[in-house]
Amino acid sequence: MLENALLLTVAMVVVVVLFHPRFRHSRDWRATVTPLASIIGSGFLVAAPLLAHAVNSWALLAMAGIVLLAYGIGEVIRYNIRYAEPLLSRDQGPKLLLVVERFSSLILSIAYVISVAFYLRLLASFVLRAMEVESEFLANMITTGILIFIALVGLWRGLGGLERLEESAVDIKLAIIMALLFGLAWFDINWLAQAGNEISYHSVEDWPYTLRLLAGILLIIQGFETSRYLGSEYDAETRIRTMRYAQILSGAVYLLFIGLSLPLLGDFHAQRDETAIITLSAIVSAVLPAMLIIAAVMSQFSAAVADTAGSGGLLSEFSRRRLTPSFGYVLVATMAIILIWSASIFEIITIASRAFALYYLLQCVVALIASRGCGHFVQRIGFVAIAGFLLLVVVFAIPDAAQQ
């Protein structure tokens, strides 16, 4: 069909552009891709069904709120790159600053463990969906097998070889996402041209409960903090600039995706299937489900490898090198295996959201400590306000699956 050919063409054009040497060798683009890949990762695949289930057609408003909160948190991280890092690198900052930063690194490593479990459990769900099989047991077995494989590679040969796959996987994933957005726009134009079609807004009966559900899916915008830990490769100004680029671009993509999906979300409020985006995309074009499964598998595996490496390294740092990174990878994989056998994927999303919210909360504390004596009064008010929001997420977030 014409739509299928157009979408494949869009994906191929974007791949050609992203693989062009001008992009591949661009220092700013490489620094942007790392946080961008994390932000537009697993969250993108589950955003529409989760938001539709939580707030039905108000999903775009909810997404806008989540994007704004993420950008505010990003400002905290960027402030810490500029003002806290120099103090931490010289070990001349207040002792409290060093303690809070070290504890936040431990929390981040734990959050990465949880996100690894989420990434690979979602990967297994998409693989089984491609084979038209529904089995939580099989999904957990596949996830366990992949985690054991990653742990063995990390223990014996390191993760460098696997990580080299990451950049290419990201480019292909972005190309498929652009094809999806193009397909949704094409569908919406035809849908709006038909008489009687309009988006219906159902009232939300329990806003406090709904806000707790939304707090439980903060994970979908996580990933921009990775710029904070690229100091060995990029200077502070480059990381600050490219992290902002990544957040603006990913925010635009999320808002476009949810906005363009509204005509399709009318009946999705009753679904909690993590692969529901496949059902949604099949309505748009016959070729999109296969493309999204490819994007899901590539992005989940590369993101899991990256977070395993990051978490293993942070755990090694926290133990003052008593735990080697290689054994850190094994520990990460072991904890992730325990998690996937003891919680549903929606519970994992909420646990991860709480863990990342606690990390971001501690980064607000780092910013408050680093800003003492700098006269940054307005910024300090902002740090306190964002910390308040994050504290609510840590305390009150609940899994979407809790709504039975």
Image (tube, grey):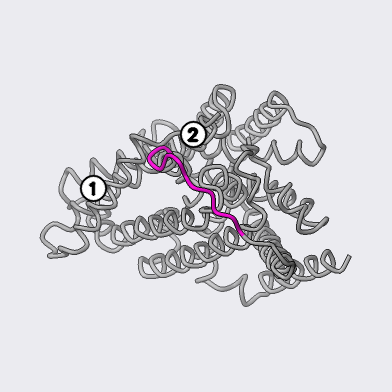
**Amino acid beneath label 1:** Val
Vertical comparison of 112 with 322: above or below: below
Q: Is residue 309 magenta?
A: no
Query: First in sequence: mark 1 or mark 2?
Result: 1
- Give me the residue at 59% from left, 23% from top: 341
> In front here: 87 or 241?
241
Q: Residue at x 27, y 50 (%)?
A: 364
| Span highlighted in magenta in the image | 199-209
Q: Quadrant of the N terminus?
A: bottom right
Which disc, if any, is residue 399? 2
Give me the C-alpha separation between circle 1 and circle 2: 26 Å
Residue 193 x/y as whole percent: 73, 71
Q: Main secondary structure of the magenta part?
A: loop
Q: Is residue 153 left or right of residue 243?
A: right
Most foreground residue, 267 or 157:
267
Position in image of residue 180 (x %, y %): 70, 61
**At label 2, which amino acid type do we have?**
Pro
Characterize the local packing of mark 1: few (<14), some (14-19) or many (20 or more) Cα atoms within 10 angstroms.
many
Given residues 367 and 293, the one toward you in this image is 293
244 left or right of 269 in image: left
The residue indicated by pointer 1 is 365
Task: Give x and y (percent) for residue 241.
Answer: 41, 70
Q: Could you say where residue 288 lies in the image, as x and y percent from the top left? A: 77, 56
Mark in front: 1 vs 2 = 2
Looking at the rendered image, the quarter that the C terminus falls into is: top right
What secondary structure is marked by label 2? Answer: loop
Residue drawn where x is 55% and y is 38% of the image = 116
Does the magenta run of residues contain 205?
yes
- The reply to whether discs 1 and 2 touch (Cβ–Cβ < 8 Å) is no
| Disc 1 element | helix
| Number of numbered discs on residues | 2
Q: Give me the disc on residue 55.
A: none
